[in-house]
Amino acid sequence: MLGKIFFQNRDAPGNIGLVTYRNSLNIGITEEGLYLSFIFIMRLFHPPLLIPWEKISKAGINSFDEYDIYVDIPIFPNSPTIIRLPKETLEKAEYILKDKSNN
């Protein structure tokens, strides 16, 4: 069960690694970490994902005005997975993300 949700955005676009999701991500920022789930039709193949804060090594705005979130995955220790979200998707939660991540 998730703790308090500080921020939530539904049907947002974004990239996880090399895969682009168009208006199909649900994003939440909780006490435990960054929560991602997908719209109803995609949930069968994509279970919800909670990324603990300690697994986020870096987060910030890139040169394309998008939010890059670097996630450390033990399988690929020297190559973090990048979650890329439009800036406006996380603007209201930027201060929480910067505070919680390991920047």
Image (cartoon, grey):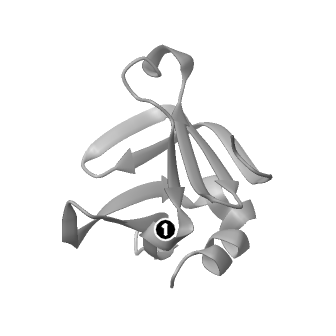
Expressed as whole percent of the image width and height from the top left, the position of residue 57 reads 42, 77
Q: Nearer the viewer, residue 63 or 80?
A: 80
- Note whether 44 is above or below 4 in the view shown: above
Q: Is residue 89 left or right of residue 16?
A: right
Going by the numbered disc 1, the residue's amino acid type is Asp
Expressed as whole percent of the image width and height from the top left, the position of residue 46 reads 40, 28
Residue sitting at 65 percent across and 48 percent down? 28
Residue sitting at 55 percent across and 18 percent down? 40
Q: Is residue 23 left or right of residue 78?
A: right
Q: Is residue 86 left or right of residue 96?
A: left
Q: Is residue 55 left or right of residue 40?
A: left
The local secondary structure at tag 1 comes to: loop
Expressed as whole percent of the image width and height from the top left, the position of residue 12 reads 57, 40
Q: Nearer the viewer, residue 45 or 98?
A: 45
Residue 45 sits in quarter: top left
Expressed as whole percent of the image width and height from the top left, the position of residue 91 reads 68, 63
Number of marks present in the image shown:
1
Q: Which residue is mark 1?
A: 65
Neighbor class of circle 1 (other Cα within 10 Å; few <14, some 14-19, many 20+) is few
Residue sitting at 75 percent across and 53 percent down? 7
Residue furthest out toward the front: 1
- Note whether 50 is above or below 56 in the view shown: above
Name the quadrant of the N terminus.
top right
Q: Nearer the viewer, residue 37 or 90?
A: 37
Residue furthest out toward the bottom: 103
Residue sitting at 49 percent across and 41 percent down? 13
